[in-house]
Image: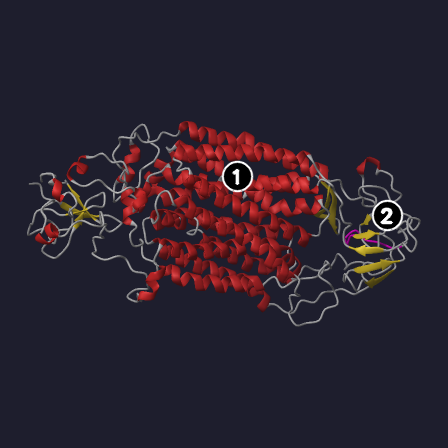
Amino acid sequence: MAMPQNSTRENGFCFTQPLDFSCPSPRPGEAGRALGAMSGRDGCSTPLSNGITSSGAPSPSDSCAQPLCTPTPAEEETPFQEGIKYVSAEGEEPACGWGGFTPGCLQLCNTSKGVLFFLCVASFLQGMTVNGFINTVITSIERRFDLRSYQSGLIASSYDIAACVCLTFVSYFGGNGHKPRWLGWGVLVMGLGSLLFALPHFTTGHYEARSAAQVGVCGGNQSLPCSQAASSLSGYRFVFMLGQFLHGMGATPLYTLGVTYLDENVKTSYSPVYIAVFYTAAILGPAAGYLVGGMFLNIYTEIGREIDIAPENTLWVGAWWIGFLGAGAASLLISIPILGYPQRLPGSQRYIVMRVSEAHQLKDGSHKKASDPDFGKTVKDLPRSVLLLLKNPTFIFLCLAGATEATLIAGMSTFGPKFLESQFSLSASEAATFFGYLVVPAGGGGTFLGGFLVNKFKLRCSGIIKLCLLCTVSSLLAIFIFFIHCPNMPMAGVTQMYNGSALPGGHLNLTAACNAQCGCLQETYSPVCGTDGIMYYSPCHAGCKSVSENLRSGKKVYHECSCVDKALLPGSGKAEAGKCTSSCAKKPLLLCFMFVVILFTFLSSIPALTATLRCVSDRQRSFALGIQWIVVRTLGGIPGPIAFGSMIDKSCLLWQDQCGEQGSCYVYQNSAMSRYTLVAGLVYKVVLGTTFFVVACLLYKPPPPESSPGSSNASENDTSDLQEHKPSLPAEGDL
């Protein structure tokens, strides 16, 4: 009789090869009796590769070997009541804890739902910090530390640079290592990055707003001299860049190892729902960051000091640093329980052995190399792992499709608030809050709904790709709403002449007879809305000579404005700080279809991720996600905002003038902005996104139904000879 040879796989089971099936089939009266675990010399039992406990013949050299089908007297008397039991080779389930400290109360959290909760908190904190707080406070940081726009752009890009540098290393070695430890240390590093990002507030002196109540009116001191030397505070940009670099390093395991850890420890049909909940938390994070960050910006950065300027003033700096302190402390705390989780959860082996392989089949059969238990454990296998993924066309085109979707998502998340601000004449804070309210139900709901649909209809890999294609086409139809736009609010000297006539040739002319004596400078942009319904570049450009404060609204009201038409209303000649309110009748329609675009764009995200996990070998899942994230960030996340920004800048009507140098854009032409947004959507949705999903679907080659399980997989409908000598396996849904 052939003797079993034990080999240990990464999941901790003892596997036997070859198997011995020499025992007779069970008699009808014994069909319900136990099959498996026969006690050996040391009480060890050996499970088969499909997870069924077995034993071989006794041998002095193998303490785990017992006859395969010889029942013990105890088993002959005990009916098999609970079906097949999956027993770890170590003889006990992995416990949750830190080293030898594994208290019983912690084992209540040692479940897939417990892991999901802590990972959701971590992804929420990451999204709130990186995609919420950073985008909200970047203007305040520029003002506080005298940074230029390209310098703040480097700060934002440091996150993606760190992620691209670390993804290959983390996904390759972490995928074959102890995933919760990689995740826990990553969240801890992310928390340290948040605390470091807030550090410059405590190492610099007090911020002094160089302003007075009369600045901005006709005849007042309009601006600081251009020859003022640059502040030495700009050197703090390197601290911010380092903080963002730590953010990127810490978040790298979260969306590669975190996803595969969830996928490995739940049923295959439940995996899309768990991943959808995880990503929904990541999307709710930025929305919370916009809302909470906006609240903190209404608090003056030097808490407790009295100041005579309002948040609407261009010199105001809010308490940008509070959010980073809170997020950093929370990340340090949440890393502790994540570090305590075992390499695999109790009972997870049943899902591993019952999983059906859907990996793309290569013509040369090289995909079978990834089934080797020792594959991927050394750096020598790295080139071969990359080659296997590059030879998988379905994986490649899913990565490219993800990059196009990431381009749209990154572009819209960066410039979506600016689009709303321009179309509906909102302030920056109002637009950010508005966009946050729009993203929460559309982005979060779409992400969760995508995972729910995959689970509801039990879609296989090819069906999932078709669902992604359907979502892309649906969002494409909604993009045509950008043919519609709201008209620009009339602005004297920018969209029309001061007397109401059209500008000749579209050239700016901010000077008129009514403000010629005021000595207004273009560096001071502080829009006001006159009682005649026309916006003016600043109180000075409106010819206003005095200022007061509206006690009800708290806004400043400017009087004796010589450029405001006094013939329209008695007692006019006034202007209020801020933009004129837009009364665009197309606003509900635009918002409705923007909601649809965001919904269907995020609806395909979880199905696309699930298809990526299923079209590659199990042992390559973490590494495949790492490579995909590199492609998505390199081709989508990093150039996306640049591409969108370049197109949107073409619609600019009024540029900032910083002592003769062009700065950021103040006023956009709404019709041109909608047109360029439509062009970008069509290019990325039709020419790229739809095409990539179609090609991925056409080139996908599933394994034949009768193929034997690959890697550590076993088919749910396995018809191997083993079933001739054992009771039928329970259905996956009954486990």
- Color style of the picture: secondary structure
Task: Please rate how many residues cluster around mark 2, counting C-alpha atoms within 10 Å: few if below 14, some from 14 to 19, many from 20.
Answer: some
Q: Report whether residue 155 is seen.
A: no
Does the magenta portion include 313? Answer: no
Q: Amino acid at mark 1?
A: Glu
Residue 642 position by quadrant: top right
Residue 488: % across, % down: 76, 42
Labelled disc at residue 405: 1
Please identify the quadrant where the N terminus is shown: top left
Labelled disc at residue 511: 2
Q: Report whether residue 328 is seen.
A: yes
Indicate left or right for 332 with 645 as reference: left
Indicate left or right for 16 with 199 as reference: left
Q: Is residue 83 above or below residue 330?
A: above
The local secondary structure at tag 2 comes to: loop
Q: Residue furthest front?
A: 29
Disc with the residue nearer the chain's start (1 vs 2): 1
Task: Please rate how many residues cluster around mark 1, counting C-alpha atoms within 10 Å: few if below 14, some from 14 to 19, many from 20.
Answer: many
- Work out whether residue 113 or residue 320 is closer to the camera in this orientation and state it: 113
- Work out whether residue 649 or residue 354 is closer to the camera in this orientation and state it: 354
The local secondary structure at tag 1 comes to: helix
Q: Amino acid at mark 2?
A: Thr
Residue range of the region highlighted in magenta in the rendering: 518-527
Q: Main secondary structure of the magenta part?
A: loop
The residues tagged by marks 1 and 2 sit, at their Cα atoms, a distance apart of 45 Å
Q: Residue at x 45, y 46 (%)?
A: 276
Q: Is residue 147 above or below residue 601?
A: below
Eye-nearest disc, 1 or 2: 1
Indicate left or right for 178 with 422 as reference: left
